[in-house]
Amino acid sequence: MSRPEDLLPPDLFYNDTESTKYTTSSRIQRIQSDMTHRALELLHLDRPSLILDVGCGSGLSGEILSEEGHTWIGMDISPSMLAVALERDEVNGDLLLGDMGQGLPFRPGSFDAAISISAIQWLCNAESSDDRPEARLKRFFDGLYACLKRGGRAVCQFYPKNEVQRKMISAAAVKAGFGAGILEDDGGTKNVKTYLVLSVGGGDITQAVNGLDDVDIEDGRNVRQAMNGKGIGTPKKGSKEWIMQRKEKMKHKGKVVKTDSKYTGRKRRVAF
């Protein structure tokens, strides 16, 4: 069976007919509900929060967010999906038409948290020769990092086509500055659900995942070392890698930083 993202771009695939069929399917409703509850569990929110729902579709995931007491803003590329959402009484979030592969048009630090259910695998498809999946992923994760508050988390449930896509997505998240881990539910079965759990500087990603066997830390560090609280994506303070990450975070905030050179991160000799 062909994957939807292999057939058409999302704004064309989810036309009026497909959007209505998707939203009214009891099976889809159940799956979306389960995955949204799982994403909220991984976010570890302890109070009502403002949440960004990326790829919100017809508002099935947003409906759960409202039920759990959160306020949310949804963004989707399909006009037909958003039209269905506007017609549904259960949808209480604000809705925005936009392509996440072109970035996220929100002010820095706007959201406490973010979720994305069954959406980000579409970023691995470029619809023209002028665009590349890597560029779309970069714009998305850079924008997501910028619009989350420090210490905020995001959980993206997605269906990678293969291991190459899985690694390309997680690598793009780490490069944007996130602490990142991948959790799989029902691993090894055809019903496997993959969750990319992300944290902005100041959050501990290891608190969001339970157990070692089903967790894959994506920045190359040892899983057990990470679970012992040494952090994900946090190099030694003062090292070149640490300095480069700090500069990238400053750039995301719109601040001016010094140009990189061969002397960046180099230790100075003690002068007497």
Image (cartoon, rainbow, N blue to C red):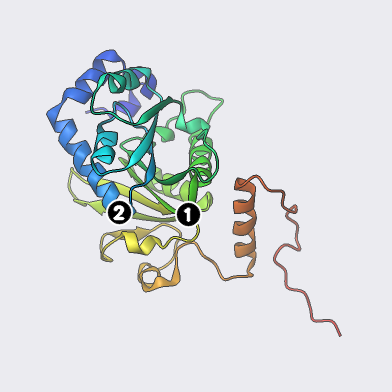
Q: On the rendered structure, is 139 left or right of 37?
A: right
At label 2, the amino acid type is Leu
Instruction: Name the disc covering residue 42, or none.
Output: 2
The residue positioned 24% from the left and 48% from the top of the image is 38
Q: Is residue 13 visible?
A: no
Mark 2 element type:
helix
- Quarter in which the C terminus is drawn: bottom right
Q: Is residue 136 visible?
A: yes
- Provide residue 220's location: percent of width, then percent of height: 44, 62
Determine which residue is flagged by label 1.
200
Q: Residue furthest right?
A: 272
Q: Residues within 10 Å of mark 1 (few under 14, many from 20)?
A: many
- 155 up-or-down from 123: above or below: below
Mark 1 element type:
loop
- Along the line of sight, the residue nearer the viewer: 254 or 10: 254
Q: On the rendered structure, is 228 left or right of 172?
A: left
- 92 up-or-down from 172: above or below: above
At label 1, the amino acid type is Val
Q: Residue furthest left?
A: 26
Instruction: Name the disc covering residue 95, or none.
Output: none
- Quarter in which the N terminus is drawn: top left
Q: Residue furthest bottom?
A: 272
- Provide residue 61's location: percent of width, then percent of height: 27, 36
